[in-house]
Amino acid sequence: MKNSKENLVEMSFWDHIAVLRNVLLKIALVVIVIMTAFFIYMKDIFDNVILAPCRADFILYRFFHYITTLSSALPDFDITSFHVNLINIQLASQFFIHMSTSFWLGIIFSFPIIIYLLWGFIKPALYSKERRGVTRAFIVGNFMFFLGIAVGYFVVFPVTLRFLAEYQVSEMVPNQISLDSYMDNFLVMIFIMGIIFEMPLLAWALSIVGVLRRSFFSRFRRHAFAALLILAAIITPTGDPFTLMIVFLPLYGLFELSAFFVAKDKPEVEDDDVEENGTQTI
């Protein structure tokens, strides 16, 4: 194995700055192009995608309704009366939300390209052994990120929205949900789920540097089970066991999947072998 960096070319500090500047300009251009595309079609995106969980015919609600019709023991899931009407209380809110949503969607959907461009900047400074597994990590990381986005959009946010939109401390206090509040929760919940689904990639990275081993998952499995159950209950405060499991199972599945990407513990060296060889091989 070579110990020197491949095709290494000496560059001054300002040369690195120039290369980084070009990379950042490319990233900015990509984000602007994708953001512009979202800005142009934002009305259709709002009507058919972003505001879809506000309607009773959303795919998750119809799925829950179908499941509850299979057994009389399950409570009926009503999909006829649910509807969320959003209001706007500030003059410029709709314009700024149009702009900010386009920007954040541009960031999210250009994420793979951003990581690829940044990797192209970092790659020449790494040894060949340090580049191992990066391609696989790039593919898996992006897949898990967008899978988390999908789970956040199709499961976590609609369940939370339905509960909070219908919850009332008193019949005398009707809910009037502002567009700003809706979008804040929508973007935050979906983005958080995308980050949470990077758990296997984080576990793999910690395993590479020797911080995490597979025995950790066996030792703390019961603790993780309880912690993730509490987290799922916080995300979906409905009190419905079925809905709770819909959120909990993917989170716990991520925990178990993370163990698969972590290296096994190194076998312990017997005392006799240590005495015989004089040293312990690592």
Image: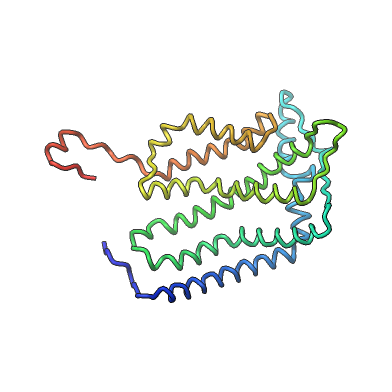
Residue at the image position 60 percent from the left and 46 percent from the top? 193
Residue at the image position 41 percent from the left and 73 percent from the top? 13
Looking at the figure, which quarter contains the N terminus? bottom left
Is 238 above or below relative to 20? above
- What x and y, as percent, mark residue 238? 70, 32
- What x and y, as percent, mark residue 90? 82, 55
- The scheme the figure's colours follow is rainbow
Is 198 above or below relative to 250? below
How many numbered markers are drawn? Answer: 0
- What x and y, as percent, mark residue 12? 39, 75
- What x and y, as percent, mark residue 236? 66, 36
Residue at the image position 49 percent from the left and 56 percent from the top? 139
**As rendered, which of 51 and 80 lies closer to the eye?**
51
Is 132 above or below relative to 9? above
Residue at the image position 55 percent from the left and 64 percent from the top? 113
The picture quadrant where one finds residue 157 is: top right
**As rendered, which of 214 and 77 lies closer to the eye?**
214
Which residue lies most toward the top here? 73
Q: Is residue 229 left or right of residue 136?
A: right
Looking at the figure, which quarter contains the C terminus? top left
Q: Is residue 76 left or right of residue 136?
A: right
Q: Is residue 6 left or right of residue 119?
A: left
